[in-house]
Amino acid sequence: MWLAAIALVVVLAAGAGVLWWSGATLASDPSELARIELQPLAGSLVSARASLDGGKPVPLRVSGGRVVPTALVSPGAVVHVEVVVRRPSWLGWAVGRTRHEQLTVRAPVAGVPDRWLTLADGSALHVRFAKGVDRIAVGAVRPSRTVAAGGRRVVSLGPQAPSGSLLVAAAPRSWERLGAPIRVSWFPKTPMPGVLVSPAPKADVSPLTTIRLTFARPVGETLGGSRPHFTTRVSGTWRQVDAHTLEFRPTGLGFPLDSRLALELPRTLSVIVAGRGSEQRLRSIGWTVPTGSVLRLHQLLADAGYLPVSWHPAGDPVARTPQAEAEAALAPPAGRFTWRFDNTPPQLTQQWAPDAVTQITRGAVMAFEHDHDLTVDAFAGPMVWRALLLDAIAGKRRTDGYSYVYVHTHLPQLLTLWHNGQTVLTSPGNTGIPATPTQPGTFPVFEHIPVGTMSGTNPDGSHYNDPGIRWISYFHGGEALHAFNRASFGTPQSLGCVELPLAAAAKVWPYTPIGTLVTIENQ
């Protein structure tokens, strides 16, 4: 009996030994995706497969028991590994011909525990990772310069500017692609809490520039419950990117063109500019938004119907979106202008310049300002640009047409009214006498009234006061187009104005709203 028991124990022990020596394990590996270990009696590896969540396969190479992807995997990706082992035939009948092992691995991610550093002048910048990394890439705008790390946790980037910010992307393993960029910022030692400002204070910024404030200490510790604010109303939103960073992203048309931005801080801080070691103790930070280009101003005024020319882009028209229009204001598209009418008077055509401000520009701006209830000053300031861009987005266009008046001062003196390619009227008129001549040149109408009182000083020093003057269009100082009762017309008789018969003045007046150009020929 006892002999049988001993024999049973020996058989069981031998069976256990066979199972032990035929084992296979699939486990994680400190440097590769996984490691497979086969015992002497385990047989041979038939296959090794891997896939990502979602089923996308990951090609593998198995060497020396190490399972290595042959295509790069993103840090943090979940990888499912499965290996199949075929046992020896003499053992397969008892415990199965194949053995399957499975393992789920998350590709490691290398974080940066300290992303806000204080750096002594001239010191090297050391970036510390949460775990060793194979390589990193760094860059100011995007990570583009690769640095081998060889598994180190601390990587030196060498001496840097006294202050700055870099994007750093890391690949913890050789079989991983670079991970999402992480911004690392460094500051000089400052007497007050420091803030790294981008773009630099006093710089020119585009309407859609993101304003970034990176604080040496956490935002809450530095500012408490307060937040920076612009002194004028701007379109956009603040967001806290991380514990140390605030960003303002403009929306809509963004910052007004041709304006000064002033950002008030809740407290005085040491304001630092990237690349510089010096700091300024400031409570307010300012930038300048440049004005739009003259060329784009003309393109918009032409599209809106305020110029005697039409605009034809060389490529696709600017998209009717705030972003596209704001960008085009500073970087206008290529194209060409053409005259809207074949018989445009030469007195007008010779004054046109696509990339320079002329009287044609000033008159168009004044007409636009008047139509949009803006201050009429012939200057394309922030409000004019905003209204122009909004009209461009909405596709609005003036339908009144384009008028132009020119006056021949040689005898007989004549006024010609031209509108949309047609000569509407030619009438005798009176310009100023030699003692008070009508100023030659081209001028936009700045005041347009149906009836008023005209007063002033005669050449002999006496004063005049004439009420009930009809159909007045002032274009230069006290000089105006208007009706006046004279025995004859066509010779110098006025004190500087262009006098017209009542019927002619009544016909001219509706065509000369604010902004209409009047040319007094120097002949």
Image: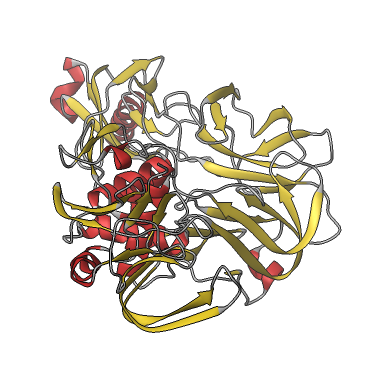
Q: Is residue 522 left or right of residue 308?
A: right
- The quarter of the image holding the N terminus is top left
Pick the residue in front: 16 or 308.
308
**Spot occupied by residue 434 in the image (x, y as percentages of width and height):** 50, 55
Check the image and report above or below for 398 versus 139.
below
**Spot occupied by residue 55 in the image (x, y as percentages of width and height):** 19, 37
Q: Residue at x 38, y 35 (%)?
A: 74
> Going by the picture, which residue comes out furthest to the front?
487
Check the image and report above or below for 13 versus 466.
above
**Spot occupied by residue 396 in the image (x, y as percentages of width and height):** 20, 60
- Is residue 51 visible from the viewing direction of this image? yes
Pick the residue in front: 129 or 196.
196
Task: Name the image quarter holding residue 152.
Answer: top right
Q: Is residue 139 left or right of residue 299?
A: right
Its colouring scheme is: secondary structure
Task: Name the image quarter holding residue 375.
Answer: bottom left
Q: Is residue 309 left or right of residue 257?
A: left
**Spot occupied by residue 271 in the image (x, y as percentages of width and height):** 74, 55
